[in-house]
Image (cartoon, rainbow, N blue to C red):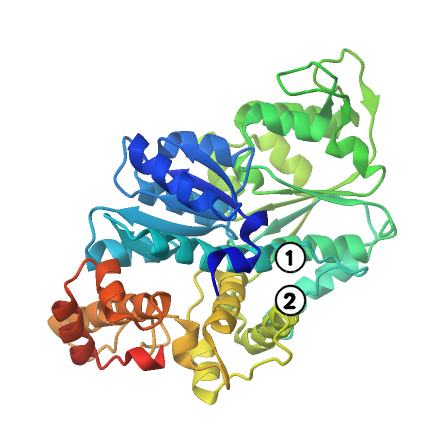
Amino acid sequence: MTAAGRGTSRLRVLVVEDQPEVRAVLRTLVETFGAEVREAESAERALGVLAQWVPHVLIVDIEMGAVSGLALLVSVREHHPRVRTLVVTGFGTIERAVEAMRHGAANFLTKPFDHAEILEEVARVGEEALVAERVHKLRPGTGPRLIAEDPQMATVLELIQHLAPTQVPVLIRGESGTGKELVARALHQQSLNSALPFLAVNSAALPDSLLEAELFGHKKGAFTGADRDREGIFAEARGGTVFLDEIALMPLSFQGKLMRVLQERTVTPLGSATARAVKFRLIVATNRSLRECIAEGTFREDLYYRICVAAIDVPPLRERPADILPLALHFLATYSREMRLGRTPSLSATARSALVRHRWPGNVRELENAMQRALVHCRSGDISVDHLSLGDEGESREGGVPEDLSYEAGKQKVLETYQRQVIDRALRASNGNITRAAAMCGLTRAAFQRLMRRLDRDPSQQ
């Protein structure tokens, strides 16, 4: 299917490249199939763009000024997990490819790049991103389903049931991707005010001034672009729930303003001198220890005691293995419907085993992405281990190597695992074209073929 035939006219793409001529070429290429494209000449500038405009696809060079493309990848993966990233660079080595993909890159392309290949890759990952966006926007009447079948989640469910009918602030703690927002939504859905709004804000995604405008509202003309009066989140809640995610990363200067709102239950919109009363139930979430943040001087102790009236700790996915397969099957069914596949592929026995063995450092969010990726790569039949692209087949339950291996043997095993993952990704991205796959990895065709033979990879199976 051609790029233009994939509905990419709704696609948003951000090009981050410090060479103006390369940036212009990439923009012109992507605009040929109707996508909305914006540019940034540095990682620092890209972070500014991302604070106000989130793309579906990020095209980024690794080697740039003070902040590298890899540092940008880390930030995007943390704050905008649904954004797909393509790395374009002149430094095409397997080591670079492995590092970029470990930080969330969907593929690794080398300069000078093939124009048709760029378009194909943007269309491919863009299609994945658009599907993810549609699923994220699905908000049934009862909200997204909180799947919690593992005994480790029993305490979480009990606390939700106990705290939901109250109006006390709740602090939800857990690693990134564990489903803290789903817990917040479950609290709201089981509350006495479930018919009222549930409004979520990522505290880390917006700079101080925009965060204040988002939460407090603003008057027309309060700042550039404020062309009308706007109510803030606290006012829009009207007795419902306000969920502030990543509260630990909220600017210290803003924490004092939030403290006053919680004390006085009034807000003053930007550009106004008049305070207005607000009513809401506050739920916050963090993936960091707030006590450590207090010790570091990055979080106010008085705010901590104000928001931590009750706390819910969400276990990481690796500690709730009985949830892995139910979650995987749920995501497969959801994405199969969205992609209109007509059927939901089954998980092979080896795929199920690999899912349970995997350590899931990205938790439920990583599992969701793995299921979506598997559906894209699975042409027919069951989903196999290769379709999952977990990169740790054969590793121990702890995610490392068997203890009886020597240092050299262990190092070689880890290297081969990464090489196998990179080769498989390149073969899938190139539809089995060895020449293109070799170019993606910065290798000659002969060197790529030797590596394939040594690692027993078959392009027809990708």
Between 64 and 399, the one nearer to me in the picture: 64
Residue 28 vertical position relative to residue 194 in the rendered view, above or below: above
Question: Residue under circle 2?
Answer: 338
Q: Taking 92 as reference, is 123 left or right?
A: right
Q: Residue furthest top?
A: 273
Q: Residue furthest bottom?
A: 349
- From this viewpoint, is residue 322 visible? yes
Residue type, numbered disc 2: Glu
Q: Position of residue 90 (x, y in %)?
A: 21, 46
Q: Position of residue 405 (x, y in %)?
A: 17, 78
Between 124 and 101, the one nearer to me in the picture: 124
- From this viewpoint, is residue 394 visible? no
**SS for callout 2:** helix
Q: Position of residue 36 (x, y in %)?
A: 53, 41
Question: Residue under circle 1?
Answer: 134
Q: Residue at x 72, y 54 (%)?
A: 185
Q: Taking 436 as reference, is 34 left or right?
A: right
State yes or no: discs 1 and 2 in contact (Cβ < 8 Å): yes
Instruction: Give the quadrant of the C terminus.
Output: bottom left
**SS for callout 1:** helix
Q: Which mark is residue 294?
A: none
Reading the chain from its start, which is encountered first: label 1 or label 2?
Answer: 1
Q: Position of residue 97 (x, y in %)?
A: 26, 56
Q: Taking 242 as reference, is 192 left or right?
A: right
